[in-house]
Image: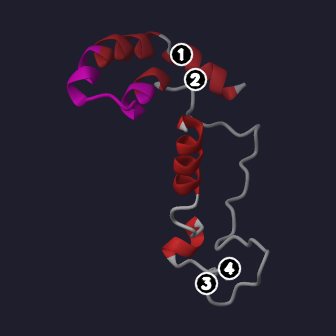
Amino acid sequence: MRQRTLLILLALLMGSTGLTPAEATGANDSTVVAQAQGTRGGTLEPRYEPAPVADPDAYDNQYVFAMSRGVADAAIAPYGKLPLYVLSVPLDLAFLPFALIGGLF
């Protein structure tokens, strides 16, 4: 008796809705994809011309005040940057001649 009751309850729970999730939400099989005007399907094109790559032999200022620039670009609260500036600016000044020479060669 108990097994028969469990089987009946299980059958009722499994077939209670009778609808698939797609049918229950009202979704159909067709999918619409919105595209920008003037684009072709399946192709990716940049909207701008990429910047030319700089000559690697050219001198740039990446070595001059690099530690201070790193502190300025860091994602740290302004009150947290102050102690780092106290450390980085004197070190940048001490290594400034080496940074200038290193940037030239």
The label nearer to you, 1 versus 4, is 4
Label 3 neighbourhood size at 10 Å, few (<14), some (14-19), many (20+)? few
Q: Specify which label sits upstream in the sequence, 1 or 3.
A: 3
- Horizontally, residue 44 falls left or right of residue 100, namely right
The N terminus appears in which quarter of the rendering? top right
Chain part drawn in magenta: 69-83
Mark 3 lies on residue:
36
Label 4 neighbourhood size at 10 Å, few (<14), some (14-19), many (20+)? few
Whether tag 1 and tag 4 are in contact, CB under 8 A, the answer is: no
Residue 77 vs 54, above or below: the answer is above
The local secondary structure at tag 1 comes to helix
Tell me which residue sits at (63%, 80%) in the image. 33
* Residue type marked 3: Ala
The local secondary structure at tag 3 comes to loop
Mark 4 lies on residue:
29
Residue 65 locus on image (x, y percent): 46, 25
Mark 1 lies on residue:
97
The label nearer to you, 3 versus 2, is 3
